[in-house]
Amino acid sequence: MDENIKKLVRRVETLEEEVSTLKRKIAKMEPLSTADIRKAEVKESPQKTTVEQTGERMTAEPESKQTAAQTMAELEDKQIVAQTTAELESKQTVAQTTAELESKQTAQPVQMKQEPKKEVDFEKILGIWLPRVFMFILLLGVLWGLKVGMDNGWITYSVRIVMGYASTILLYYLGMRYVKGEKKLFGVTLLGGVIALGILTTFAAHYLYDYFHYMLAFMIGIFYIALGLFLSKKTKSETLTIFSAIAGFLLPFLLEGQGATALQFCLYILLLFLSLFYVSLSEKHKITFYVTFVLFHVTLMIYANFAGTYGSEYIIVATVLIQHISLLTFYIRGLISRQVFTEVLIYTNFVFAISWIKLLIQPQEVVVYGLFALLYIVLTAYVFSEKDRSLQGVLSAVAVFATSVFILSFQLEHIQVKLMLLLINGAIGLWVGLYYATKRTIVTSSIIYGITAWTVILTVYMERFVSYDHLVWLLLLITMGWIYHSIYRFGPNKFHLQVQKIDMSLMIGQIISLLYIFHLTQIWLAQTYLPYETESHIQALIFMAALLFMYFAYKWKHGVYVTYAAVIEYLVLGLVIVSLPLTDDFLNQWFLFHLFVEIGYVFLLTCLFVIIFKGKLPNKEGMKAKASAYFIALQVTCFIFLNKWYFAITNVYDWDREYVFLVHTFLLFLFAFLSISLGRKWNWKAVKIIGSLLIGFCLLKLFFIDLINISIIIRAILFIIVGVVGLLYSRTLLKD
């Protein structure tokens, strides 16, 4: 098979060569030679005998002119055949190659190149931490060696101090030498030892040996801290800066500043913070800044706990406020890298500041909180006028929060005034956030408004129509309406909010409105001295009227979900009404009113079902598809109310026992027949099944309860009426 294919390939190649030769000759208009023609014929029929070939050569010469044209045509046909064969073979080869590649891809899934994991450079880690560890070990060894020398009397107090300061000079020399060389980390570690050893030596000279006065020791300590900051800038080492910060904030406690006043202490802490703040900004040391910020407040807390705040609270608060305003000024003017000082720290700094202000007595506290709120309001107005988007949200959010703190600091006789001011503050903040599209303001204002509104709902109970409580509720509804108006106006355009979701949120406002109506009704009922049952039915009647009014909200383009909520709330109201007693302990003089309210409820419920069945509500197709389920709910509700009304009527009007059973069984049969008829009319299978089950229940009641409890005369009347009615109704079923 392979040999035949090879022969075919060689034949095709020979034909291509001959065709190309013929084309060249035709192009030159050269006549074909007899040899060419013979060669072509020989190639075309290789199986001819030698005799036939000789005969052809003998006859070819006289007929060369006649057959030249025919030979050219044949050769052109062969060329076309050869080209077609070659194209088919190439296509097959491409198809086979494609299939092989696909099979390979299927068999061997492509493996994603994974970046090689970076190997942990343990030598580098050890080079960073081992010098620090061994520096600590060295210090311990030196301390123990000194202890041995001191215990044996070899080293006097003065010698110890001199050795300490001399060691700092030696460490400084060695540290700078290594920093200038190729071992900067080791050199920085030695320079950190300069600060630690210098502070400890000064501490010993002052506190242990009483060589230095407090002020002299304090100045020497400041010198070492300043040296540390200088070295950190020179070596560009954040580690030295942090080390200097820790030493600086510990210095006053190490020296136990007996001679230092609160003013001196706070001034030192403030200047130290500002110095470290400057270094962290200039060198963009993020960790240094956070460490400095935390140490500043921790140092003040420790001082306030140990030294007390009596008489010094003003100095401490002033120190915190200066620090706060300094940070805020640098941040607003853009002098702070946002990578160093994030907006989260603004909120944290604000919380620390308002916490420190609590040290003041109440009148002064209110003034400072008011100035604080005014400061942020002015700054917010400034950044909005400058159209600085990066600061608008941050400062406006803090301004809303600061104003809330200012309001809460009031000592008022009526807490409702605070609630009203907080509602107004939250609503204004929400409007600002929506108008200027600042999400931070919206979040802060929503939290304040939401907590205040929840407090009003849970704690503010109206007892009089003209009262602060009523005013709070009115303001809640007014601000809530204004907020919804602002959301509809700005939400879809600036925040791409879906109008449908805003429509759904209207249900919250609807529920709050119903609570307000409940409180108003309670105020009125508290003055009537009516029985509880009557008050409850009056409340239910008012709710029915309110929900009926809210039902028509679907005619407003945004009120569809309010209508749905009204329908659901009306059904829930039915659960409350069915549990209310129809009779009372005061001669049942309000019985008919109670009965009227409940009949009105069932009538409106039936009208609601008819509206749903006729498809007059929004989403009518979906509503109408569940009409049978709604009718079952109506069927069960009517059955419960019918039994409740019947037994209440028989109780109030003192019916005879036998007549109670007679009429009740007859009513149940009528209800069952009506259920089956309606189910058959609209082909509601579940309704027909419930009606059939009710007929079975009525038959069981007829034979097992009514037969025992009624006389033979009433029994005969009952059975005759039920039998006649049943037969007539069965006849209608047979007709169908």
Image: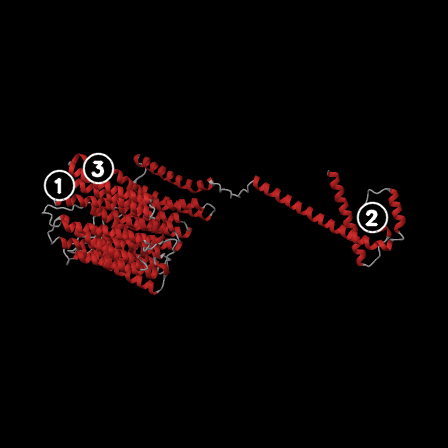
Q: Which mark is residue 331?
A: none
- Quote the CA–CA distance across marks 1 and 3: 18 Å
Sequence order check, earlier mark of 3 and 2: 2
- Local secondary structure at mark 3: helix
Between 354 and 39, the residue placed more toward the observer is 39
Q: Nearer the viewer, mark 2 or mark 1?
A: 1
User: What kind of residue is marked 1?
Assistant: Asp
- Callout in the foreground (3, 2): 3
Q: Position of residue 262 (x, y in %)?
A: 23, 52
Foreground residue among 56 and 279: 56
Residue hosting label 2 = 41
Q: Which mark is residue 702?
A: 3
Q: Earlier in the sequence, mark 2 or mark 1?
A: 2
Q: Point out the residue furthest to the bottom here.
A: 385
Looking at the picture, tell me which residue is in the foreground, 172 or 23: 23
Instruction: Classify mark 1: residues with Cα within 10 Å, few (<14), some (14-19) or many (20+).
Output: few
Q: Give residue 321's position: percent from left, percent from top.
A: 27, 56
Quarter of the image where one finds residue 437: bottom left
Residue furthest to the left: 587
Instruction: For mark 1, give the secondary structure.
Output: loop
**Residue count near mark 3 (Cα–Cα under 10 Å), binned few <14, some 14–19, many ≥20:** many
Q: Which residue is mark 1?
A: 656
- Pick the quarter of the image with the C terminus: top left
Q: Check whether the beta carbons of the residues at disc 2 and disc 1 lie within 8 A of each other.
A: no
Residue 272 is at least partly visible in this image: no
Q: Secondary structure under badge 2? A: helix
**Residue at point 36% right, 62% down?**
388
Q: Is residue 473 left or right of residue 490?
A: left
Identify which amino acid the numbered label 2 is placed on.
Glu
